[in-house]
């Protein structure tokens, strides 16, 4: 039986099956109290925030359909039960969520649950347009293996991870960094200490990201600073994961051509990744992270949505991570958890 619940944004949650959550708990032989204790522990180990109580009353509300779990709770449940959101009844499965690719055995380690978890997470990277996703998935797996065996048969690589606010791009970029060992260059922490004082000095608000002043006078300098940090690594031939919205850049063939030429001159490859997400999930992620720079978007959500195209794709060959309804981030959580269990 399908169940729905009215949400704060005035929509219905279609396809929710809270009975599935109870079935998983009972299959694991857990009481509500025991499940709550383990939920708090797994959330703490994974570094998830906003799973403060996980008391029996809250878990009971989730299982009876009185309250739909927010993103941190859903991520923690997936980690606890080693399951996906569709299998836990949070939503219907998306097309292609169960696809797999072949994983070669590790040289010094047998294929265990950690390898399976990584493989499942990497299946969320697919061909967006003209990019060999299978080979790139294998490349990331090889980078993981090389951290244990040494050697790199490939050129260094700059991975551009772009997407709209709340799409999950930063979380996925962190996952790639933790998997490969490549350094992460994240626009927000890198440029915010300069951007906010500059906006204030120009007479705007420090969290302005929607006016012409920001777009025309501040954003170009912000992205120039970001890319200078990336080019410093390119010059040293260091593979790098860089994350930012990259809305204008990934849709600009000339900009991407200049980046490709500059990297190619140093023997460095470029792999653009677009993180696809649905509007409802983006709203949910933005609401839960509570960043000041998102205040305008949340206050004028419909107005903001009218300015973006959720079906936007880069104008150059690229990869796509399908994070609609949080599917990719949930699998990345489980892969990181499995890797942590192996290293521990």
Image: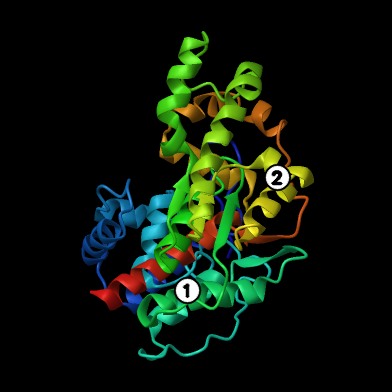
Q: Secondary structure at mark 2?
A: loop
**Left or right of 221, for residue 118:** left
Residue shown at 74%/50% (left/top)?
257
Residue shown at 30%/70% (left/top)?
340
In the rendered view, tell whether residue 149 sits above or below residue 48.
below
Q: Secondary structure at mark 1?
A: helix
Q: Judge by depth and name the residue closer to the eye, 128 or 139.
A: 139
Q: Judge by depth and name the residue closer to the eye, 3 or 48.
A: 48
In the rendered view, tell whether residue 241 sits above or below residue 200.
below
Which mark identifies residue 16? none
Where does label 2 land, which residue? 310
**Left or right of 38, for residue 231:** right
Which mark identifies residue 143? 1
Image location of residue 129, percent across then percent down: 77, 62
In the rendered view, tell whether residue 199 sits above or below residue 278.
above
Residue shown at 29%/78% (left/top)?
342
Find the distance from the CA under tag 1 to the CA under tag 2.
Answer: 31 Å
Residue 177 visible in the current orientation = yes
Residue 19 visible in the current orientation = no
Residue shown at 61%/46% (left/top)?
163
Counting labels gives: 2
Say which quarter of the image contains residue 282. top right
Q: Judge by depth and name the residue closer to the eye, 20 or 303.
A: 303
Image location of residue 81, percent across then percent down: 37, 71
In the rendered view, tell whether residue 116 sits above or below residue 96.
below
Residue lying at the far top of the rendered structure: 203
């Amino acid at each position: 039986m399908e169940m729905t619940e009215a949400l704060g944004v005035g929509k219905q949650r279609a396809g929710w099956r809270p009975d599935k959550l109870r079935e998983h708990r009972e299959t694991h032989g857990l009481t509500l109290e025991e499940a709550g204790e383990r939920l708090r522990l797994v959330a703490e180990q994974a570094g998830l925030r906003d799973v403060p109580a996980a008391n029996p009353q809250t878990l009971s509300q989730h299982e009876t359909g009185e309250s739909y779990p927010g993103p941190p709770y859903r991520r923690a449940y997936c980690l606890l039960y080693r399951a996906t959101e569709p299998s836990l009844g949070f939503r219907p499965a998306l097309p292609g969520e169960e696809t797999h690719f072949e994983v070669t055995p590790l040289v010094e380690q047998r294929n265990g649950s950690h390898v399976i978890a990584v493989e499942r997470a990497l299946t969320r990277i697919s061909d967006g347009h003209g990019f060999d996703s299978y080979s790139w998935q294998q490349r990331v797996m090889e980078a993981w293996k090389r951290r244990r065996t040494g050697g790199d048969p490939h050129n260094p690589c700059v991975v551009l991870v772009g997407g709209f606010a709340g799409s999950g791009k930063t979380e996925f970029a962190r996952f790639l960094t933790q998997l490969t060992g490549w350094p992460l260059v994240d626009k927000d922490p890198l440029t915010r200490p300069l951007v906010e004082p500059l906006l204030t000095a120009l007479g705007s608000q420090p969290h302005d990201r929607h006016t012409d002043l920001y777009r025309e006078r501040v954003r170009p300098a912000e992205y120039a600073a970001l890319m200078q940090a990336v080019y410093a690594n390119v010059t040293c031939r260091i593979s790098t994961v860089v994350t930012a919205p990259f809305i204008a850049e990934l849709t600009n063939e000339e900009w991407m051509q200049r980046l490709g030429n500059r990297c190619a001159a140093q023997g460095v490859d470029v792999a653009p990744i677009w993180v696809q997400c649905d509007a409802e999930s983006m709203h949910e992620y933005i609401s839960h992270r509570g960043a000041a720079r998102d205040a305008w978007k949340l206050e004028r959500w419909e107005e903001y949505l009218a300015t973006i195209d959720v079906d936007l794709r880069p104008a150059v060959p690229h990869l796509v991570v399908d994070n609609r309804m949080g599917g990719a981030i949930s699998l990345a959580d489980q892969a990181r958890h499995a890797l942590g269990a192996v290293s521990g």
